[in-house]
Amino acid sequence: MATSNQSQSQFQDFLPVMADKLGGDGLIEELCNGFQLLMDREKGVITFDSLKKNSSLLGLQDLSDADLLSMLREGDFDGDGALSQMEFCVLMFRLSPDLMQQSEFLLEEALEQEFNNFQH
């Protein structure tokens, strides 16, 4: 899908550099900060409207509505039409194949940490 490839090119060089500089915990913290910037404050998730409104904060202002919707659909695992923090982080890793090839353990570590946080 062309939209996915376009979105992919926005991130694939960015996340590996962040991972190298920040390490696993630092990268997860930065992804969480990105989520906070994009989320709808009232709903606590990223909606199409909040993504469109705040996308320029992450340099995504050139993406069309169709691109933004495609990004939301690609990351929306539970089908609620929005991205939770976990869905957003997983999507960012999926859009960065270089990062996944170099350090798949970062995603597993993040998922385990997030799972443990929800259990406590």
Image (spheres, rainbow, N blue to C red):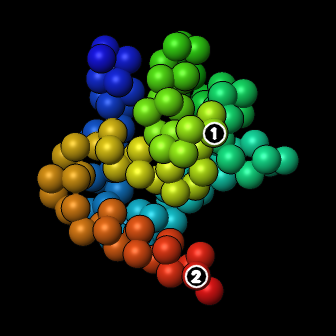
Residue under pointer 2: 119
Residue 72 visible in this rendered orientation of the protein: yes
Q: In which quarter of the image is the C terminus?
A: bottom right
Residue under pointer 1: 80
In this orientation, which residue lies closer to the viewer: 110 or 23?
110
Name the residue furthest left: 101
Query: What is the distance, in whole Å, between disc 2 and disc 1 at their CAs?
Result: 22 Å
- Disc 2: CA contacts within 10 A as few (<14), some (14-19) or many (>=20): few
Image height check: is 111 above or below 62?
below
Image height check: is 40 above or below 65?
below
Name the residue furthest front: 79
Residue 53 placement: quadrant = top right
Q: List x then y, in percent, for residue 106.
A: 30, 67
Q: Which amino acid is tagged 1?
A: Asp
Is residue 81 rendered to the left or right of residue 109?
right
Is residue 60 rendered to the left or right of residue 101?
right
Q: Residue at x 20, y 62 (%)?
A: 103
In this orientation, which residue lies closer to the viewer: 22 or 111?
111
